[in-house]
Image (cartoon, rainbow, N blue to C red):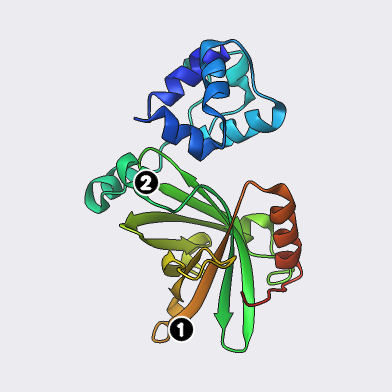
Amino acid sequence: MFGANLRQLAKRYRSISALCRQLGVNRTQFNRYLSGESVPRPDVLDRICRFFDVDARILLKPLDEIEKIEEHPATPALTEFLGSGADAIEKSPFSPGFYAVIESLSAEHRMTLLHARPLAQCTLIRGYVSRAAMPEATPKAREIQGIAAASGDTVYMLTSQREGHNSRVYLISPDPTGTAVHWRGSVISPTNATTPEPVVLKYLGHDSTAIFAAARLSTNNVAQPL
């Protein structure tokens, strides 16, 4: 059942090789999943489920019997207007996975941990404002969602908390210096619309050690300039 479900999900993507890169799964091993010869380890299954917005029932039940998560209503329009569909995503150097986003706010630095997940139509962004920045807020109130689109090597992102609170627009490009910083650019917000602030993004991918270290720094509201 898992192999049949995975084959159906993979049909949304034109290139199995690109899909494997986005999932961080070896192509040979992915072929074994598709053929039903093997099933993934729990951590790999979790990664696949998160990527396709499904749950572990894909091991046992046909996709048609599993409740569908509605497609984001903006994605068809964005695909057509921005050209941010599967082809553009595959050609973009903006890889799926986690990013440590460090904004320079004048004399201080603030770090947020964001996750980028490409779909067939667009790249979705999700994260949370740290508890240190909003100690009394619920996780729902701290949640960040957004969307990213690529134009050549340049990526522009729009993120926001609920009801447009703390919205931000990022314009970033690959960093040419070869340091730990992978992206560099500027960010602008409605509260400071006339003065863009510098921002850097460090790609963490799916490295759990680096992700948890960044999450601890974010929770403590600590960030060092890179």
Instruction: Please identify the residue farthest to the bottom as the structure is shown.
Output: 107
Residue drawn at x 23%, y 51% is 81
For the residues labelled 2 and 1, the Cα–Cα distance comes to 30 Å
Three-letter code, disc 1: Asn
Q: Which residue is mark 2?
A: 89
Hey, what amino acid is under mark 2?
Ile
Residue at (38, 23) in percent of width and height? 11
Give coordinates of residue 98: x percent, y percent. 59, 53
Numbered badge on residue 192: 1
Q: Is residue 213 above or below residue 50?
A: below
At 46% across and 18% down in the image, what residue appears?
Answer: 7
Q: What crowding class fits label 2: few (fewer than 14 Cα within 10 Å), some (14-19), or many (20 or more)?
A: many
Q: Nearer the viewer, residue 200 or 218?
A: 200
Look at the image and tell me whether residue 74 can be seen: no
Q: Where residue 15 is drawn, which disc sits there?
A: none
From the viewer's perspective, tell me whether residue 147 is left or right of residue 40: left
Q: Position of residue 162 (x, y in %)?
A: 52, 60
Number of dots carrying numbers: 2
The local secondary structure at tag 1 comes to helix
Q: Quadrant of residue 174?
A: bottom left
Q: Is residue 204 left or right of residue 4?
A: right
